Every structure is written in C-alpha cells, then in structure tokens.
Amino acid sequence: MRQLTLGYSPCPNDTFIFYALVHGKVPCPGIRFSERLEDVETLNQLALAAELDLTKISYHALGHLRRNYVLLHSGGALGRGCGPLVVARTETTMAELRGKKIAIPGTLTTANLLLQLHDKGYDNLLVLPFDRIMDAVSNGAADAGVIIHESRFTYRQYGLSQVLDLGQWWEEDSSCPIPLGGILARRDLGAELIHQIDSSLRSSVEYAYAHPQEPRAYIRDHAQELDDEVIRSHIGLYVNDFSLDLGNEGVRAVTTLFDRAEQRGIIPPCDLPLFV
C-alpha cells in the first residue's frame, strides 16, 4: 500500500469533494491518502516546497509550480459568479484604492492575481488568513480587502460594502469562467498513477453528489462558518460540473489566465504540458 500526502482546505467545497476519497468510499487501488487540511495560501507554500504529493492550490500558485506539478481534471474550483470580492468600510472606487492598504488572503492566491491583472497600483498589501480579512477592514487595519470562500456570503454582517466583484470583471473581460483553485499531482508520480488518482477524485465528487448528507458531519467539523445555509450556499457555488471535469471551457479559462499573467510578468513562462 503506497501512502501519498494530500493537501486541501477545510472549506466546505473541499471537504465535500474529498470526503469519499479519504474515507475509502471510492476505490483507489494500492493507495492510502494522508490528508493535511490547511488554508489555501499554506497549501500554496507547501507545494512550492514540493512537500505534498497531491494538493489543492490557487491557480496563481500553479503558475509557479508547473515544472514540478501537473493539473488534474477533477476536484477543482472553477465557475461563474464565484469570484473574489473587493470590500471596504465606506463607498469607494478601485481608482481611489490605488496605493491604499488592501488585505489579501495570500500573495499567491488567485484573488491577488485577479487584483493585479485588473490594474496596476495595488501593491500596498496586507497578507492575512482569509477568515481575518473582514475584521481587518472593519477595524481599520486595512482600507479594503479581497475576500474569498464563505466570506462573500457574510461580509455585510461586518458593515462592509462591495467595491468590485473581481470574478464578474474577469468573466466580462475574458469571456471565460473564473479559475480559482485546482488539484495538482507531482509529475514524478508518473502518468499511470496520476490518471488513476484523477479518476478516483472524479468518483469522489460523484459520490458526494449522490450522498449529499453523508459528508455533512465531516464538513461541519472543519468549516469556519457553521451556519447550515452558508455551508449549502458555499458548496452550491464552488462545486459544479467543472469540479467533475474541467473540460475544454475550463482548460481555456486556465490557459487564458496564465497567458495574461505571463504577459504582465507575474508568473514565469513554462513550456511543459499542463496535464500528463
């Protein structure tokens, strides 16, 4: 039995997706998974250090990881109407936020990449865990914040206002869905094993869809926000057909994101294939 390290976040979409895989509900012959649940920026940094065999990451981070990792077709977060939001305490504009302190959930998050691609001048950044950003904006530690995950459902409770939906901007500007996070496998695992894992991961998503109540306790054990409606909304927004398979539209979205980031010099170019 081969043991592989597997990293993913404690957010409801990830625990929903990976529940069946890590609990042996779907077959993955000869493989035992040792899971590690961390916030997405920690996972990005662990992947940069090549410490995980398989991991959820931000697509921004993948731009720096393509020499050591390949992208899987299943298990990721990509869609429409699910992008990061820029929020502030008072009504303002993105132009007025240039040079102001903006809290972000990590340097290598796709949230930060979309902020940088939107325009220049947003380089006074305060890096915080995603669940601390709304507090930081609310108490004045930051002038604005880029929020992700379930925060998009709760920011009004902190007295905050939306400045810009970065996901909506991306969709309108690129005509692509939003590539938020993907699942990676180390290239040196080999094509046969990677294909096997990708297939099992798709089966894990299918299992969760077929048995939506079964992972509920596991999801609640790890969720930052325990409100059942927020958890349901979170899963409904971030788990979709692209989580089963990126497909041609998803792949186009990822390559478009990388092309733009390379042109701006935000990520290095890479001539290796994205998939095995």
Image: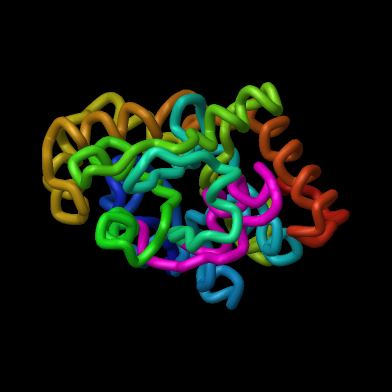
Which residue occupies 65% across, 26% down?
Answer: 176
Residue numbers of the magenta segment: 106-130
* Residue 86 seen by the camera: yes
Q: Is residue 211 left or right of residue 192?
A: left
Please tell me which residue lies in front, 206 or 113: 113
x, y percent for residue 82:
44, 32
Please tell me which residue lies in front, 175 or 205: 175
Q: Is residue 134 left or right of residue 65?
A: left
Q: Is residue 225 above or below residue 175?
A: below
Is 116 colored magenta in this rendering? yes
Is 193 colored magenta in this rendering? no
Q: Residue 69 falls in which quadrant of the image? A: bottom right
Which residue occupies 84% across, 49% down?
Answer: 263
Q: Is residue 188 above or below residue 118?
A: below
x, y percent for residue 115:
59, 48
Q: Is residue 244 left or right of residue 27?
A: right
* Residue 183 seen by the camera: no
Please tell me which residue lies in front, 94 or 177: 94
Q: Is residue 162 above or below residue 46?
A: above
Which residue appears farthest toward the right when viewing the image? 271
x, y percent for residue 20:
30, 43
Q: Specify the quadrant that holds the N terminus.
A: bottom left
Which residue occupies 74% across, 48% down?
Answer: 274
